[in-house]
Amino acid sequence: MAACHPLWEDVTADDVAWVDEHVGHGNFRTWAKLTSHLTAEIYGRSRAVVDRRMLERACVRLMGPL
């Protein structure tokens, strides 16, 4: 995903795999929506790191309870 958007550059491979397993399912449109949610959440923060907790919150907003 790092090749698709810089937000994903610092996200661990394990977290990317977790997101794909639970929400992404290889669907680029879903990944784009998730990226949008995460970008909105970190907007204005200096050096925001996308971690598992942030990913979980964004996935719940996108898909409902996991």
Image (cartoon, rainbow, N blue to C red):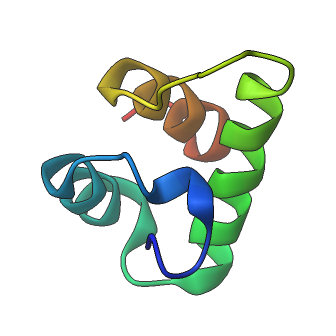
Given the current orientation, which residue lies at the most extreme left position?
14
The answer to whether 43 is drawn above or below residue 59 in the figure is above
The answer to whether 45 is drawn above or below residue 9 in the figure is above
* Quarter location, residue 30: bottom right
Residue in the foreground of this view, choosing between 50 and 60: 50
User: Looking at the image, which residue is at 58% across and 22% down?
Assistant: 48
Residue in the foreground of this view, choosing between 38 and 46: 46
The answer to whether 1 is drawn above or below residue 39 in the figure is below
Q: Position of residue 46 (x, y in %)?
A: 71, 17
Q: Is residue 34 left or right of residue 45?
A: left
Q: Quadrant of the N terminus?
A: bottom left
User: Looking at the image, which residue is at 18% across and 58% down?
Assistant: 13
* Quarter location, residue 16: bottom left
Q: Position of residue 52 (x, y in %)?
A: 31, 28
Q: Position of residue 60 (x, y in %)?
A: 54, 32
User: Looking at the image, which residue is at 72% across and 60% down?
Assistant: 33
* Quarter location, residue 56: top left
Query: How many numbered marks have been drawn onto this rendered protein structure?
Result: 0
Q: Is residue 44 left or right of residue 1?
A: right
Q: Quadrant of the C terminus?
A: top left
User: Looking at the image, which residue is at 21% across and 52% down?
Assistant: 18
Q: Position of residue 6 (x, y in %)?
A: 59, 61
